[in-house]
Amino acid sequence: MRIDDLPIRDELRGQSPYGAPQLDVPVQLNTNENPYPLPEPLVARIAERVAEAARHLNRYPDRDAVELREGLAGYLTRTTGHAVTRQQVWAANGSNEVLQQLLQTFGGPGRTALGFEPSYSMHALISRGTGTGWISGPRNEDFTIDLDAARAAIAEHRPHVVFICSPNNPTGTAVAADTVLALYEAAQAARPSLVVVDEAYVEFSHRESLLPLIEGRPNLVVSRTMSKAFGAAGLRLGYLAADPAVVDAVQLVRLPYHLSAVTQATALACLEHTDTLLGYVAQLKAERDRLVDALRGLGLEVTDSDANFVQFGRFADTHAVWQAILDHGVLVRDNGVPGWLRVTAGTPAENDAFLDAVRLVIKEL
Ligand code: PMP
């Protein structure tokens, strides 16, 4: 029996699932995770908080995750200098689920979403998964957003949802606030549509968060995650900040009790240790910059990066280079951008292993 023999929805036929390889190799620099394990005092605090939650697992968790949203609002307020309230924050199992809830609410059959590609592949996949038509918008050769072309695409297609990924995955490109504002205006002029700014990597950026732009713009949403800067990808905790009406709207589609008591307890413990966790960010930014310089020093092209990863190239046979680096024990990512590969900034030792592998591989090219 093959998938296509089953009575699945027509639009899913022939599609591939999200599939970053999970290979057991010594150096894994392919999914933009934080390479540092959680510090022991935090592990102990998680155990304590989860033990307390376990005493009440006979009951459903707080459906509105009030304490957690309060904590996330506090984190956003502290780090952006822009006051955010719990009513403006919503949380789910990873920002992927946040994006899915937004598309279930603002997209869906008969509606479309537009993103500027190459970008995070899940924007298109979650759109399709929610029955939302996907429109691939343009980017410049250097992967920045071409404002005129972007405005023209919005005016032509009048999408119901517009994705702006900043810093952008897989290129690392940050988007200026002026550009976001111009795209928001264009999207509102075409029809009242939702503009989603995906800031999964913003803690690594040279630029400020775009979060203050939500003020007075009810159709602008900023999505965030604890998977990257917080180093808690295994936790599955993403969140958004927007007008309280957007938070009310996603209640229409969220599954009741979607965030388990264990998840809420763990995320709250992580928020208690924000300063320690974010302590690694400075180190990872320095390593990211070191990767950029070293790869350029090897004569490779590197896209300027505001994230915890670096896009490098260009290669005639991208897949062969990916495989050759893997043969040296280092897993990087082939995102399907012709000519380019992406490496996540790891520990200094992991980055050294990666650079050694690249040196050997390009000699053989
Ligand atoms: N947005 C972007 C741009 C990403 O790269 C990722 C993870 N690769 C996510 C969202 C989703 O992250 P998570 O579901 O772990 O929060």
Image (cartoon, grey):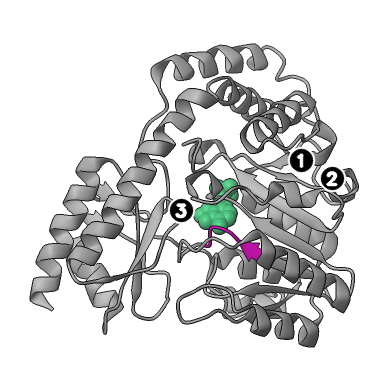
**If you read the primary sequence from the N terminus, does the residue marked by circle 3 or circle 2 appear first?**
2
In front of the other: label 3 or label 1?
3
Q: Residue at x 83, y 74 (%)?
A: 109
| Place of residue 226 in the rendered image (x, y in percent of width and height, measured from the top left) | 56, 39
Q: Is residue 295 above or below residue 266?
A: below
Residue indicated by mark 2: 247
The boundaries of the magenta stretch are 164-168
Instruction: Please name the amino acid that badge 3 sits on.
Output: Ala
Residue indicated by mark 3: 307
CA distance separating discs 3 and 1: 24 Å
Mark 1 burial class by Cα count in 10 Å: few <14, some 14-19, many 20+ = many
Say which of 20 and 134 sits in front: 134
| Place of residue 364 in the rendered image (x, y in percent of width and height, measured from the top left) | 9, 75
Determine the main secondary structure of the stretch shown in magenta. loop
Question: Does the numbered disc 2 mark a residue whose Cβ is under 8 Å from ligand 1?
Answer: no
Q: Residue at x 76, y 63 (%)?
A: 195
Q: Is residue 126 above or below residue 191?
A: above
Q: Residue at x 68, y 58 (%)?
A: 197
From the viewer's perspective, tell me whether residue 177 is left or right of residue 20.
right
Q: Are the residues at dot 1 and dot 2 in contact (C-beta closer than 8 Å)?
A: yes
Q: Quadrant of residue 126?
A: bottom right
In front of the other: label 3 or label 2?
3
Residue indicated by mark 1: 90
Mark 2 burial class by Cα count in 10 Å: few <14, some 14-19, many 20+ = many
Does the rendering let one see residue 329?
no
Number of numbered tags placed on the structure image: 3
Quadrant occupied by the N terminus: bottom right
